[in-house]
Image (tube, helix red, strand yellow):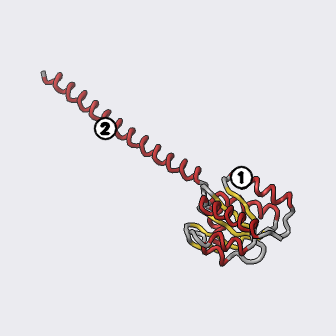
């Protein structure tokens, strides 16, 4: 059993994680082996996300001060917190793919921008394109727009040059 000092350390650690995070997902990892949880944590590390398992009362205490206060409503039973620091979709995507691969584990819900999300909303978040994919599609759109503008301007300049040439020929023929 954890001592009072150890519990205070866990709460402080969770509070620090909550401060850095922009998304929190609550999942049930019952039935997972230590090796599977370790593998899951390594996958989350690549997304700049963390998986932390703690008692629900400590999760409630640590989350009570900030934007994740509503997480207490879904922290019941065995709970694991998946906290994402960067792209909110990345930890959700990694979690859903990992659970699908192992055919075990469930998502109870999450919190994003102080809003409580259901398990279905977390699944929807996982289906969103990543931040890099969105940025590349925006840049592709901007690049194609610039190319189109350049082509139009080039076409106008060519048309003006052709008109000047025709006028010059007409003036030569008249002279």
Say if residue 42 shows up in the picture.
Answer: yes
Does 165 sit left or right of 10 as displayed? left
Q: Are marks 2 and 1 in contact (CB under 8 Å)?
A: no
Q: Quadrant of the C terminus?
A: top left
The picture quadrant where one finds residue 152 is: top left
Residue nearest the observer in this picture, 141 or 77: 77
In the image, is 50 to the left or to the right of 132?
A: right
Where does the image place residue 122, in percent across and percent down from the top left?
A: 65, 68
**Alpha-carbon distance for marks 2 and 1?**
53 Å
Category of crowding for the residue at label 2, using alpha-carbon neighbours closer than 10 angstroms: few (below 14), some (14–19), many (at least 20): few
Please tell me in which quadrant of the rendered image residue 29 appears: bottom right
Question: On the rendered structure, is 45 left or right of 140?
Answer: right
* Residue 84 percent coordinates (x, y): 64, 59
SS class of the residue under badge 2?
helix
For the point 56% across and 72% down, the residue is: 115
Q: Quadrant of the N terminus?
A: bottom right
Image position, residue 14 (x, y; %): 67, 64
Indicate the position of residue 97 as horizontal and vertical percent values: 74, 60
Q: Which mark is residue 62?
A: none
Q: Quadrant of residue 167?
A: top left
What's the residue at 60%, 55% (across, down)? 86
State left or right for residue 143 relative to residue 53: left
Task: Say above or below: 36 vs 164.
Answer: below
The answer to whether 169 is drawn above or below residue 116 in the figure is above
Residue holding disc 2: 156
- Which residue in the structure is indicated by mark 1? 45
Instruction: Give above or below for 20 relative to 58.
Output: above
Label 2 or label 1, whichever comes before in sequence order? 1
Classify 141 as above or below 81.
Answer: above
Residue 119 shows in this picture: no
- Of helix, strand and loop, which one carries label 1? helix
């Amino acid at each position: 059993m954890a001592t009072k000092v150890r519990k205070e350390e866990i709460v402080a650690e969770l509070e620090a994680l909550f401060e850095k995070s922009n998304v929190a997902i609550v999942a049930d990892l019952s039935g997972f082996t230590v090796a599977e949880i370790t593998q899951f944590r390594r996958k989350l590390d690549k997304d700049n996300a963390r998986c932390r398992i703690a008692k629900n009362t400590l999760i409630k205490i640590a989350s009570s001060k900030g934007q994740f206060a509503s997480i207490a409503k879904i922290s019941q039973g065995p709970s694991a917190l998946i906290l994402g620091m960067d792209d909110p979709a990345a930890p959700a995507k990694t979690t859903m793919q990992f659970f699908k691969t192992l055919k075990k584990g469930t998502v109870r819900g999450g919190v994003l921008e102080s809003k409580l999300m259901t398990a279905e909303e977390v699944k929807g978040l996982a289906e969103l394109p990543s931040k890099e994919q969105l940025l590349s599609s925006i840049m592709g759109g901007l690049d194609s727009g610039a190319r189109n503008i350049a082509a139009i301007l080039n076409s106008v300049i060519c048309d003006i040059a052709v008109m000047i040439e025709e006028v010059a020929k007409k003036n030569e023929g008249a002279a």
